[in-house]
Image: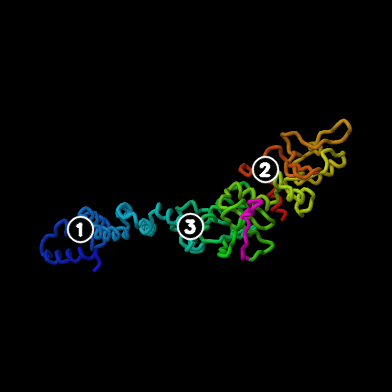
Amino acid sequence: MKKGWRPLLMVFCLLLLTADSQPTRQQQQWFANFANDPAAQHQTALTFWQQGQKSDALYWWQRAAQRGSQGALQSLTKHFPQQRRKWLVLAAEQGEPAAVRALAARQLRQPGISWSKWQARWLQPRYEFLQEYEHLRNRSADCQQQVTVVAGSNRQKARYVQLLRDVQAIELPTAQWCFEWQLDASLQCTVDDASQRAQCATSTPQVAEQRYIVFAAAGKSSAHANRLTLSEHSDRAVLAHELAHWLGFADEYPMSKPLAEHFCQGRYDFRPLNLVTTTARTLTTAELKRLWQTLPWRSAVADWRQLAQRGADGRWQLGSDSEVIGLHPAATCDAVDGVYAWKPLAQQTPMERHQLQQWPALYQRLATQALMAN
């Protein structure tokens, strides 16, 4: 016989013996217990606890908690902490906001709970008070770009939720991108000894016109034509920098020599939105005008003369005044002799230092125009 029924049987007999008399206060409390009054059940459990009858107290506190008694839940958590997870689930089932929030966050990191199962439970209308997941409910159906996020474990759901939150927050036109979770249990990632970049092998089929983000554990993040690899240390600033590559921006810090030799000598089929290169620092008037016409930010430069300073010999020394949009030296091609990189702004941008999370209005405009053109 379960321990919880021992006091029930005793009290039931007592009630039968006193059925014709006026019920005492204690008898009234037991009547309330049988009627599933959570307050009475909580009080009964407290009495048992004070008498040292822990099993009976546990039984009645659980019954009271199942009927919505917050006091009973608090007592269970306090006096039976070894079953804290069980009490958390029970409190969440009763709709206690703090417990709901804690359990939803906990299940994001549980490997046995799939993304679809998590969504089905926690994105219900009854949990609309979970404002931290509002960005998951209001995702746009108008997709400018489809992105598949590949993870090796359901433990990565929390990273996925954070990524979706970050995409909405960064100052780039990515709000209309649609993201899809993809679990790949065979995902294998290593760290390249030379570059320290994460490298991952996935069995997820790659579609040329789609984009992919792969969750790695360690190493530096990296960007390729249609694939980003992000480590656990990749924060919002890193994500924005890498997404900017997809939008058409190139690094403004010194590239490694192998990469610079390909990029700066035009071996990539890639025309960045934020950089141009020249093989000389001085140009003729005709050459400068042609360069002006080819600038990705041409519409922001009203006069070609903003791009350079005219010398006594009639040639133009490239470089604009620091306060204007024009041509400003970039360190991108420093590793390649005879090639000079130029960016539109004198200030540092997130493409030079990813920690700078404020994106210039010009860069935001260039990215939006590029998306619309595609």
Instruction: Give percent across and percent down for residue 344.
Output: 73, 41
Q: Which residue is mark 1?
A: 29
How far separated are the C-alphas under marks 3 and 1?
43 Å
Give the quadrant of the N terminus: bottom left
Q: Amino acid at mark 3?
A: Arg
Residues in magenta, as a range = 191-204
Give the quadrant of the C terminus: bottom right
Is 202 inside the magenta-drawn segment?
Answer: yes
Are the two marked residues, 3 and 1, in contact with CB atoms closer than 8 angstroms? no
Checking the image for residue 109, the label placed there is 3
Checking the image for residue 352, the label placed there is 2
Question: First in sequence: mark 2 or mark 3?
Answer: 3
Secondary structure of the residue carrying numbered label 1: helix
Looking at the picture, tell me which residue is in the foreground, 329 or 248: 329
Instruction: Give percent across and percent down for residue 156.
Output: 53, 57
Name the residue located 36 percent from the left edge and 59 percent from the top edge.
86
- How many numbered circles does the render carry? 3
In which quarter of the view is residue 95 placed? bottom left
Instruction: Give percent across and percent down for residue 190.
Output: 61, 57
How far separated are the C-alphas under marks 1 and 2?
72 Å
